[in-house]
Image (cartoon, rainbow, N blue to C red):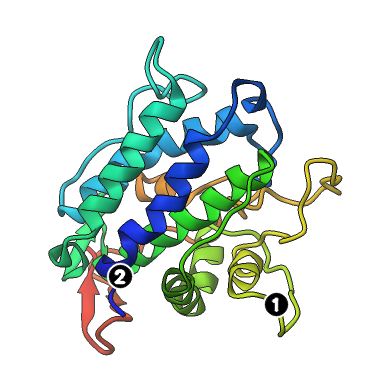
Amino acid sequence: MLGYSVMLMAATPTIAIVRSIGDDQLTAPTPCTEFDVRGLMDHLLHWAPPLEGAARKELVPPRDGGGGNSAGPGDDERVVLVDQIDRIAKAWSEPSAWEGTTRMGSPTELPASMIGGMVLGEIVVHGWDLARATGQASEWDGEVLSFVHRELELTAEQGRAMGVYRDRVEVPDTASVLDKILGMTGRDPGWTASQPDEGRRHPCRSSPEGVSLSDRAFGRRPGPIGPAPQGEPMTDRGAPGRPVVVP
């Protein structure tokens, strides 16, 4: 199973979830405790262009705005986000997007297959976040979930160290593949809007400073893991032993 072959399959349910969000649900809390529904959509919109650009090996800055207006004045976040998810999915559906290395907003080169896997996972887990927050059912094809689960087994701990995920939430061995994915990314599969936060960290950003993968790609790295020293090799987990040199 190849990542580019399941990207559109991953995006389709998430797009349907975004389209079904009602006006009265925009201020609802989400499993990403820092954001309500509108705030999470704004966060996704702000950082989406670098993810799309990375598929084409292009260095693209975040969308103008952030802090509540990434969709643009007068634009509906839902409409803009649907379009953006579709563009990301189509860009990463090209086999060439997964080849070699790419950059995501900084000169640091990373294995394209690793970034593609993370993008695919983000489409699924943030789709779940929005579905859970708005009382919608969420279901992805088994091939999509198997691919995301396999990728997370390879990258979740690295993502946690980078500040992408919160501490792992343990789920039973008999849990569904989706619930295992949620637990690996620091989410409680049983989350409800009335569930107290209990002082736990943001499930979408594990570092106390709230630093996401995209934040780190743009040099915002106050957490424990900084950029690799100049010339230090990073191993491409897709091609063991082949170093990716950080410029």
In the depicted view, which residue is nearer to us: 189 or 116? 189
Residue 122 in percent (x, y) is at 46, 55
Do residues under tags 1 and 2 come within 8 Å of each other at their CB atoms? no
The numbered dot on residue 112 is none
Q: Amino acid at mark 2?
A: Gly
The answer to which of 174 and 34 lies nearer the viewer is 174
The residue shown at (52%, 42%) is 17
Q: Is residue 180 visible?
A: yes
Residue indicated by mark 2: 3
The total number of labels drawn is 2
At a point 22% along the width and 60% down the height, the residue shown is 93
In the rendered image, the vertical position of residue 193 relative to residue 116, given as above or below: above
Instruction: Report whether residue 247 is seen.
Output: no
* Residue linked to disc 1: 175
Residue 145 in picture, x, y percent from top left? 48, 70
Label 1 crowding class (10 Å Cα cut-off): few <14, some 14-19, many 20+?
A: few
Classify mark 1: helix, strand or loop: loop
Q: Residue furthest top?
A: 74
User: Could you tell me the amino acid type at mark 1?
Assistant: Ala
